[in-house]
Amino acid sequence: MTQPPMAADLLIAGATLLTMNADRHVIEDGALAIRDDRIVAVGKREALEREVTARQIIDGRGFVLTPGFVDGHIHITGDPLTRGFARGAPDDSWNDKLQKWVIPIFKAQTPEEERIAAQCAALAMIRYGTTTFIEAGTVIHLDAVMDGLAETGIRGRVGAWVEGRAFDPSQDQAQLSAKAIAILESEIERYPDKGGARLSAWPILVGHSTNSDDVWRAAKALADDKGLRVSAHMSPRAGDPEWFLAKYGRRPLEHLADIGVMGANVLLTHLAAIDHSELDILAKSGAGAIHCPHAAMQGGFGMAKIGLYPEMLERGVNVLLGTDGLAADILSSGRLMASLFRDARGDQDIFPPATILELMTISPARAMGMADAIGSLEVGMKADLVMHDTNLPEWGPIFDCPAQLALSAPPGGVHSVWVDGVRLLDAGRSTVIDEEQLMADVRAAGRAVIARTGLPNRTAWPVL
């Protein structure tokens, strides 16, 4: 008996599909069908055109279809409004730049300004094919940010700014810890990660040395209990190991392991200044590592000299890529990471194109506990997908589609993006956000934030 055609909302027919499934199938002249927020069919065009009846059909010829990319670490507030503002004087130390410039800029934002910044960051990510992100833990006005993000349609995991350590002996450490823990508990209650939520809160810590052991334990306990992830900055420079050694006589990951907060639901960003003993802890614990190549290179972390990311991959560590707010283009981050370590190790074969694509799709999906929903084009997965235009000179004739996308395709060649089956980008333009109005708001808000801080605008050349 002949099966009736499958009903679908959308059929994309004729595209080349980089499925990122377990067999890494590349389907030329392929097709993909969506119903509601899920992928319901994947295969060759000729077969699916017979087997699927769709309300809408898109001609995918000349396009490559991939899963949505994942940005594992991005500051979605502060940076989008003030990215072009030089932070620090020439003689300022890294810590001075952080304390006197970066943090005051972040904390000068109003709820509305953070809302605008988050929308700007989301729009930029979507334009480059990122459909899911992990925020870096520097959101002050969480409710306003979540409201703004909801309008963009992006998928994200976000956390309020949490610092719960007393650096001044006169401060009440127990009170600071309790306040920080209350923030974690409140945000997770208000924005639970369940039922396929597009946006939710995770217990994200600023990291470094900013939180007490009690706060770390509480964050880990919440993640364990609710099926979430803890994310935090750690060891971009020698300052973190030096602080932990002076305070505890142990390096940072040794201390985190000692207090029982390492595990597969922990994601640590940067990790440039870890040693091999910490690599052992990282690998054995199952924790994930988030590499932000642009931040490492521009920040002078010494990653090329001391970074252990090739060893992490060899040891089976889940590695994610992050833009850190310095860029919105995760594909360029992958290329930069590969180039960094190829040059540093004198080995042109490490970080091949397949690995670059994995670090933007299936690896972060696995590390986030979302491998059953995002990261590949398979039946039953969330309909988070990106359509890349190959009718561009940078593509040329296609011989090896995955390699060309990973290494040479223009990052700005993203034509269309869907999240949960909703088309958020069409022909490079947002379908849900008024881009002109948003950018006018961004420019006004950025100027207002800087004016409020009173910080001088230091430019390299005189402006007439």
Image: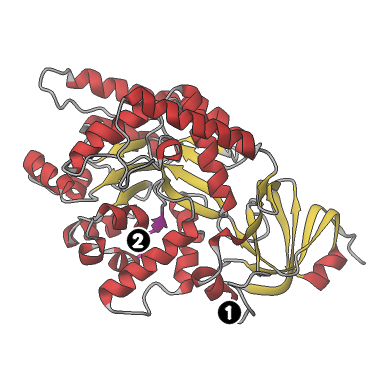
Q: Looking at the image, which is closer to me, 62 or 313?
A: 62
| Residue 375 seen in render | yes
Q: Residue at x 22, y 47 (%)?
A: 257
Q: CA distance from mark 2 to mark 1?
A: 28 Å
- The region drawn magenta spans 316-321
As drawn, 356 above or below 191: below
Q: Is residue 295 left or right of residue 10?
A: left
Q: Residue at x 30, y 36 (%)?
A: 102
Q: Position of residue 301 (x, y in %)?
A: 23, 55
Disc 2 is placed on an element classified as loop
As drawn, 377 above or below 208: below
Q: Is residue 428 left or right of residue 239?
A: right
Q: Is residue 328 left or right of residue 388?
A: left
* Labels 2, 1: front one: 1
* Disc with the residue nearer the chain's start (2 vs 1): 2
Q: Quadrant of residue 427?
A: bottom right
For mark 2, what is the residue?
317
- Residue 463 belongs to the span the image colors magenta: no
Q: Position of residue 213 (x, y in %)?
A: 21, 34
For the image, the number of numbered tags is 2
**CB atoms of marks 2 and 1 within 8 Å:** no
The three-letter code of the residue at mark 1 reads: Asp
Q: Quadrant of residue 296?
A: bottom left
Quadrant containing the C terminus in the rendered view: top left
Q: Residue furthest bottom?
A: 399
Disc 1 is placed on an element classified as loop
Number of the label disc, if any, that sits on residue 400:
1
The three-letter code of the residue at mark 2 reads: Val
The colour scheme of the drawn protein is secondary structure
